[in-house]
Image: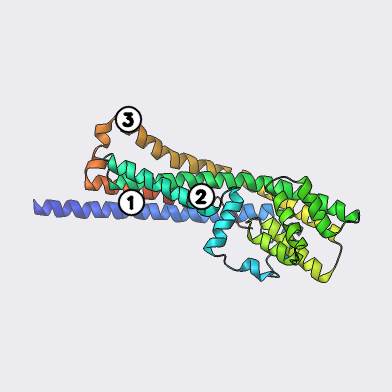
């Protein structure tokens, strides 16, 4: 009997090794095919350089933003600055620290209710993680919507500033006009710049300070370009028009990228939502079948591993749907 068990274990390990090897080979082949297709897509979109040279949009972007003319933007932000940027990008009218404390309180409450009701510590941790994940998804969706509104408003603000400069207004006067014509979230930013300049702060410092509070690369590019132009001189109205053209092309490129990565994002939603839906359906239809996941230690470990796998798969597919340019 011991010999039979040993043979069965050896056969099981061999089969597992064979299946795992085939799986690794398939993963590597898929990854190589994905990288090749990614390079083809980037070349078609003009993201990477080809024989004909880079596009004018990305060339201007790299010359101004990635050259490092403003080292303060390149420095790694602190946790406080990240929280402030998160609150600003999310459009919260309360401090980001308050939002964070509210999420921590809700997570602790969910953990306590689940544990007291007899769900066990592992299930309580899973419910707490689900609360954090739900808030993070809501926050990211809110930030994405506000980012789209911000880009559209920024184009209008650049057009207003360019017309005001050609009409004879000073740069601060054009910012003041843009703050009056543009609503949230961009209007208050220009209004704060005008207020700080009227209080004696240098305009370039005010622009850099405001650029640190937002994650918009377009606004950082604008602040850097205006700071350089104020130091070297030049036509600010033409600068506004050039920036407007660059941002319009980047918005068009972003829309094309969203179309290209639409299949990956849809696959992500289906592959993540399917195990969660099946878990709840089986818990309702056949609770006895799912009972070992809550009553046995092996089942609890399997449930925890499943939750970690879902979060890890969500992160990996989210990274696959991002194209750096």
Q: Element under label 1?
A: helix
Q: Residue at x 59, y 56 (%)?
A: 85
In depth, the one of 108 and 46 nearer the eye is: 108
In depth, the one of 306 and 149 nearer the eye is: 149
Q: Is there any visible trace of residue 38 in the rendered image?
A: yes
Discs 3/1, front: 3
For mark 1, does the 10 Å Cα neighbourhood hold few (<14), some (14 to 19), or many (20 or more) residues? few
Q: Which residue is mark 3?
A: 284
Tag 1–tag 2 contact (CB < 8 Å): no
Q: Which residue is mark 1?
A: 19
Q: Element under label 3?
A: helix
Residue 134, label in figure: none
Give the image location of residue 171, x and y in percent.
83, 59
Position of 111 relative to 325 (above/below): above
Residue closest to the far left: 1
Q: Residue at x 64, y 66 (%)?
A: 73
Q: Residue at x 34, y 53 (%)?
A: 20
For mark 2, does the 10 Å Cα neighbourhood hold few (<14), some (14 to 19), or many (20 or more) residues? some
Compare marks 2 and 3 and give the one earlier in the sequence.
Answer: 2
Q: Residue at x 80, y 66 (%)?
A: 229
Q: Which residue is mark 2?
A: 99
- Quarter of the image for residue 238 reads bottom right
Label 2 to label 3: alpha-carbon separation: 34 Å
Give the image location of residue 123, x and y in percent.
31, 44
Position of 169 relative to 76 (above/below): above
- Quarter of the image for residue 78 reads bottom right
Label 3 to label 1: alpha-carbon separation: 34 Å
Q: Is there any visible trace of residue 51 in the rendered image?
A: no
| 12 lies left or right of 99 | left
């Amino acid at each position: 009997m011991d010999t039979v068990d040993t043979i069965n274990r050896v056969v099981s390990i061999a089969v597992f090794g064979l299946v795992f090897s085939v799986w690794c080979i398939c993963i590597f082949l898929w990854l190589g095919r994905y990288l090749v297709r990614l390079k083809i897509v980037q070349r078609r979109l003009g993201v990477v350089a080809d024989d004909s040279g880079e596009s004018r949009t990305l060339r201007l972007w790299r010359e101004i933003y990635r050259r490092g003319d403003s080292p303060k933007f390149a420095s790694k932000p602190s946790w406080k600055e990240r929280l402030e940027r998160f609150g600003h990008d999310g459009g919260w009218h309360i401090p980001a620290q308050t939002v964070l404390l509210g999420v921590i309180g809700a997570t602790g409450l969910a953990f306590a209710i689940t544990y007291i009701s007899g769900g066990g510590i592992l299930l309580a941790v899973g419910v707490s993680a689900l609360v954090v994940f739900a808030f993070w998804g809501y926050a990211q969706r809110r930030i994405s919507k506000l980012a789209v509104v911000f880009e559209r408003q920024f184009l209008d603000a650049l057009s207003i500033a360019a017309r005001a400069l050609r009409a004879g207004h000073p740069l601060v006067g054009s910012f003041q006009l843009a703050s009056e014509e543009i609503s949230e979230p961009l209007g208050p930013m220009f209004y704060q710049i005008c207020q700080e300049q009227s209080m004696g702060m240098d305009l370039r410092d005010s622009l850099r300070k405001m650029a640190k509070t937002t994650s918009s690369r377009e606004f950082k590019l604008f602040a850097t370009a205006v700071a350089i132009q104020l130091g070297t001189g030049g036509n600010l109205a033409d600068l506004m028009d050039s920036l407007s053209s660059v941002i319009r092309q980047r918005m068009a490129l972003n829309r094309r990228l969203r179309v290209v990565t639409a299949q990956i994002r849809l696959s992500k939603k289906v592959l993540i939502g399917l195990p969660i839906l099946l878990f709840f359906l089986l818990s309702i239809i056949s609770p006895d079948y799912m009972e070992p996941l809550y009553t046995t230690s092996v089942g609890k470990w399997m449930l925890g591993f499943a939750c970690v796998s879902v979060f890890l798969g969500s992160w990996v597919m989210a990274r696959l749907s991002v194209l750096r340019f």
